[in-house]
């Protein structure tokens, strides 16, 4: 996925919306901050996620961090590859390292999330 076409949460998750399916992952910046990833916990298909609330955890040698959903919806697919090998997230966070796919309600908008430019500004100001 092209990061410039994605939307971002302030908590470093990215989202791509295709019809009523949202693909969610974590940003390259988050991967770099966490460093060596060792484990991930993700919800299963059919589980509900809520915007701004944790849907899982990612663990590195440094810390355990919550993963926050940028939208409300129902999990329809989980990336089993990252469950089996969390290094996939480190190696390709915007591609093979996506985390979950969520069916959102019709009319869901990503307008309240950050654009790529806004996200870049946020991480620059936080550095």
Image (spheres, rainbow, N blue to C red):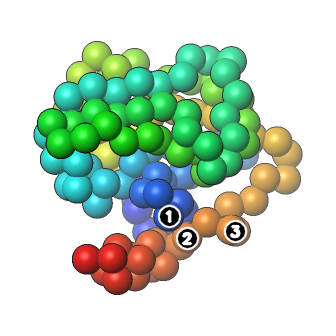
The circle on residue 10 is 1
Instruction: Look at mark 3 in the image and give the residue it sits on.
Output: 111
Q: Which residue is drawn at the image coordinates 20% and 28% (left, top)?
A: 38
Q: Position of residue 1 (x, y in %)?
A: 41, 52
Number of marks in the rendered image: 3
Res 124 → quadrant: bottom left
> Residue 120 appears in which quarter of the rendering?
bottom left
Q: Indicate the secondary structure of the residue bearing disc 1.
A: loop
Q: Position of residue 41 (x, y in %)?
A: 41, 24
Mark 1 and mark 3 lie on one chain; the one further toward the N terminus is: 1
Residue 9 higher or lower than 81, as above or below: below
The C terminus lies in which quarter of the figure? bottom left
User: Picture quarter containing residue 25?
Assistant: top left
Q: In this view of the protein, can residue 28 be seen by the observer? A: no
Relative to 25, 46 lies left or right: right
User: Real-space Cα distance between discs 1 and 2?
Assistant: 7 Å
Front in this rendered view, residue 79 or 31: 31
């Amino acid at each position: 996925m092209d990061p410039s076409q994605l939307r971002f949460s302030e908590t470093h998750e990215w989202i791509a919306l295709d019809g009523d399916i949202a693909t969610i992952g974590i940003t390259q910046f988050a991967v770099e901050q966490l460093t060596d990833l060792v484990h991930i916990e993700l919800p299963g298909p059919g589980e509900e996620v809520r915007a701004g609330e944790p849907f899982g955890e990612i663990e590195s040698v440094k810390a355990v961090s919550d993963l926050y959903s940028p939208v409300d919806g129902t999990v329809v697919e989980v990336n089993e590859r990252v469950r089996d090998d969390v290094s996939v997230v480190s190696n390709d966070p915007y591609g093979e390292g996506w985390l979950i796919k969520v069916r959102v309600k019709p009319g869901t908008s990503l307008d309240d999330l950050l654009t790529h430019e806004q996200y870049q500004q946020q991480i620059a100001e936080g550095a």
